[in-house]
């Protein structure tokens, strides 16, 4: 389990870096003054005290350590500054180790008097210019600590090295303060100068201050009770006893107090100061604890408010409390959505057996989603954000709900996922409304397209009507004008003119009859004279009317009839109109040399008339429209055949009024067409009932005469 990072007070951390920068300049200044003393042979600048001076190499190492420490404490570190700081740290550490090895192994590397020459016989010096073992060991530890801190590795080891430096320097400073030369140097053995010891103590303090955001030094920079007590008591534990002991020693040496009184006074002073410091610290800690209690109470109130707010939200909320999402809790809306009434019920499909809900499954695009692939589980395990995923929740009773789900991971202090939070919305009604709206839009577009098509058909129909009416009218007016003016005198030409006028008038009359029939049918005003009719006779009569037109077009017209009687109940005139329309339509779209066949077959229940031609045929995609009013496969200026496109529509309406059905079939363009009419042999009750009131008013339309096809 990953250990949580300690809480830090940014102000203390920033102050530690500032203190580290100040210490670095103190070290650089101390080393610089010492080097100046060696350069100009000024003893006070060499840091001499009690006959022991700071060596030139130690001064250089103090400057290098100060520079490395300053680079460590700057607020904006770059890769270059980090590398330079590490190089200075290595130089300090390697030089300290090399100097220490000379005392340990008795060799001379020639580095002691590399900068300046020192006369032999210096106090507490084993070799002229050589830094003593306490100092060389401290510089070795300083180089190690600085290098590790720059590399941001092993902070506890780096801080332990800093504490080692502090221990060596405190021993020396204590020896100087209490005149105990064994603590700082023995003539003929080794020693450490007071300035060096103080500088090293500052260096250790700077190292700890610069790394207050890591390692065990972070206890000083925290906002908690332990950190506060450490900051308040640590300085007392180090400085106050030394200071009081030094003052006591000076008073005793001056003769103001004797040894027993000095010892008693020292103990009383330590007790008083320690008691006051503890009481003051305890009061501060108590105030902090009171503030924490108040903050915790407020936090509990806020959490309760948030819980209540979650319960009243209309949007479902899920919270996965572990990375595997084996435990998921939800608010009221989420529980109602998944039909889990228990407040403490587990909503996770990844829960252990016996805890996971089993009354629903989750699908996406028709495929069931595995529990580990659900958005909440993925967000909790992988740490990814998932937005606006639509899923189908299918319950055991068959009900399906559509949900819109978004999930975000919950991260710990190290950025590792520890759970997830998700929102779910029931969009079942919205999706149904959207689907209905889409269907309405589709129907509206279809209706608009049909209306536009009808409008275009109306325009084309008006243009066609105008053309069909104008064509014979032009001939009628022309020949009538010529006859009235007397320009035509030849009897043959006069006969031809009168025949032309008659054909044009009949064509216009037929066009007008078709329009009137359509109007009557659409208005429900077409009246039928229903009575028993011999359908074979009707077919023969219609064929006789159409045959002259077929002969003129070079088309063979065949009529095939069953031998048995074929009697139906209907309007003979209208049935003849149906047959005539089918035959003329077949002749119109058949070329010279084609065959048009009318076959009448009879069964027990109905009679079937099939009109087949070998002409132009019909595109299969156009078959559903052949019976539409004003519809023609060709239109506009490219029309090769006349007519208004009403014949087949009228035929269909008349057949349906007789209780029958008509259908069209074709194998494709150039392969002919086939129209089949089926009429019941005995009228149904509905047809008979509908026909009776019409008989009284029925006026049969005159039988159609031969005319050019209108379809």
Image: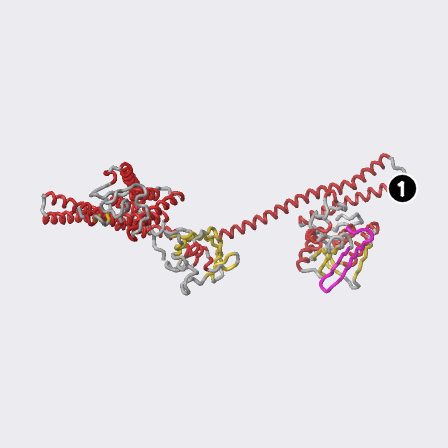
Residue 489 in view here: yes
Q: Position of residue 358 (x, y in %)?
A: 44, 63
Residue that label 1 marks: 492
- In the image shown, does 241 or 655 lie closer to the viewer? 241
Q: Tell me the chief SS of the magenta region.
A: strand
Residue sitting farthest toward the front: 120
Left or right position of 139 against 388: left
Left or right position of 249 against 171: left
Left or right position of 253 against 533: left
Colour mode? Answer: secondary structure
Q: Position of residue 660 (x, y in %)?
A: 70, 57
Left or right position of 663 against 123: right
Identify the image quadrant of the N terminus.
bottom left
Residue 299 in view here: no
Number of marks drawn? 1
Residue 45 appears in which quarter of the rendering? top left
- Judge whether 111 appears above or below 561 on screen: above
* SS class, disc 1: helix
- In the image shown, does 241 or 365 lie closer to the viewer? 241
Q: Position of residue 305 (x, y in %)?
A: 34, 50
Q: Position of residue 695 (x, y in %)?
A: 71, 54
Query: Magenta stretch: residue 235 in it?
Result: no
| Label 1 neighbour load within 10 Å: few <14, some 14-19, many 20+ | few
- In the image shown, does 342 or 230 lie closer to the viewer? 230
In percent of the image, x 82 and y 54: which residue is there? 556
Residue sitting farthest toward the top: 485
Q: Which residues are magenta?
A: 589-613
- Judge whether 45 appears above or below 285 on screen: above
């Amino acid at each position: 389990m990953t250990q949580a990072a300690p809480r830090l007070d940014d102000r203390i951390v920033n102050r530690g870096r500032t203190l580290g920068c100040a210490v670095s300049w103190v070290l650089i200044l101390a080393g610089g003054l010492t080097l100046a003393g060696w350069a100009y042979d000024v003893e006070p600048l060499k840091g001499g005290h009690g006959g022991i001076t700071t060596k030139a190499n130690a001064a250089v190492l103090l400057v290098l350590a100060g520079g490395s420490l300053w680079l460590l404490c700057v607020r904006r570190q770059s890769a270059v500054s980090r590398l330079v700081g590490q190089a200075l740290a290595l130089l300090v550490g390697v030089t300290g180790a090399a100097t220490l090895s000379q005392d340990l192994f008795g060799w001379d590397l020639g580095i002691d008097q590399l900068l300046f020459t020192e006369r032999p016989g210096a106090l507490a010096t084993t070799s002229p210019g050589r830094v003593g073992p306490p100092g060389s060991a401290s510089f070795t530890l300083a180089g190690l600590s600085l290098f590790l801190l720059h590399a941001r590795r092993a902070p506890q080891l780096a801080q332990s090295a800093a504490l080692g430096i502090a221990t060596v320097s405190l021993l020396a400073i204590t020896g100087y303060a209490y005149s105990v030369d064994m603590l700082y140097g023995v003539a003929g053995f080794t020693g450490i100068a007071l300035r060096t010891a103080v500088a090293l103590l500052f260096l250790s303090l700077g190292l700890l201050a610069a790394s207050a955001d890591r390692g065990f030094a972070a206890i000083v920079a925290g906002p908690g009770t332990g950190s506060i007590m450490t900051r308040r008591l640590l300085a007392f534990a180090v400085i106050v006893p030394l200071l009081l002991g030094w003052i006591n020693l000076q008073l005793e040496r001056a003769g103001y107090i004797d040894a027993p009184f000095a010892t008693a006074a020292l103990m009383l002073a330590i007790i008083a100061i320690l008691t006051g410091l503890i009481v003051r610290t305890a009061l501060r800690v108590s105030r902090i604890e009171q503030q924490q209690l108040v903050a915790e109470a407020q936090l509990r109130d806020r959490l309760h408010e948030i819980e209540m707010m979650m319960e009243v939200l209309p949007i479902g909320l899920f919270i996965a409390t572990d990375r595997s999402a084996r435990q998921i809790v939800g608010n009221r809306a989420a529980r109602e959505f998944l039909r889990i009434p228990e407040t403490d019920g587990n909503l996770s499909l990844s829960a252990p057996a016996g805890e996971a809900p089993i009354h629903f499954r989750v699908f996406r695009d028709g495929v069931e989603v595995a529990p580990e692939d659900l958005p909440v589980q993925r967000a909790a395990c992988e740490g990814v954000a998932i937005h606006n995923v639509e899923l189908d929740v299918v319950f055991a009773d068959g009900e399906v709900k559509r949900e819109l789900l978004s999930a975000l991971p919950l991260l710990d202090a190290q950025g590792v996922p520890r759970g997830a939070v998700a929102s779910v919305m029931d969009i079942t009604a919205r999706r149904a409304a959207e689907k209905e709206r889409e269907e309405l839009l589709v129907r509206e577009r279809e209706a608009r397209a049909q209306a536009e098509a009808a409008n275009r058909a109306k325009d084309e129909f008006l243009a066609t009507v105008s053309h069909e009416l104008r064509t014979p009218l032009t001939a009628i007016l022309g020949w009538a004008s010529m006859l009235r003016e007397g320009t035509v005198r030849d009897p043959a030409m006069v006969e031809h003119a009168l025949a032309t006028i008659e054909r044009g008038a009949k064509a216009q009359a037929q066009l007008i009859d078709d329009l009137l029939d359509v109007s009557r049918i659409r208005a429900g005003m077409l009246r039928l004279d229903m009575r028993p009719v011999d359908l074979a006779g009707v077919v023969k009569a219609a064929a006789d009317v159409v045959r002259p037109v077929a002969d003129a077009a070079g088309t063979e017209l065949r009529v095939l009839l069953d031998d048995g009687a074929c009697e139906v109940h209907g309007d003979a005139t209208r049935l003849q109109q149906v047959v005539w329309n089918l035959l003329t339509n077949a002749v119109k779209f058949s070329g010279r040399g084609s065959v048009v066949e009318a076959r009448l077959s009879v069964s027990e229940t109905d009679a079937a008339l099939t009109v087949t031609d070998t002409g132009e045929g019909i595109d299969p995609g156009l078959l559903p429209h052949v019976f539409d009013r004003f519809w023609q496969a060709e239109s506009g200026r490219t029309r090769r055949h006349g007519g208004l496109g009403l014949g087949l529509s009228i035929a269909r309406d008349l057949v349906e009024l007789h209780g029958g059905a008509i259908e069209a079939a074709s194998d494709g363009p150039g392969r002919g067409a086939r129209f089949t009419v089926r009429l019941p042999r005995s009228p149904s009750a509905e047809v008979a009932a509908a026909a009776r009131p019409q008989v009284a008013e029925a006026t049969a339309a005159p039988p159609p005469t031969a005319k050019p096809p209108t379809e």
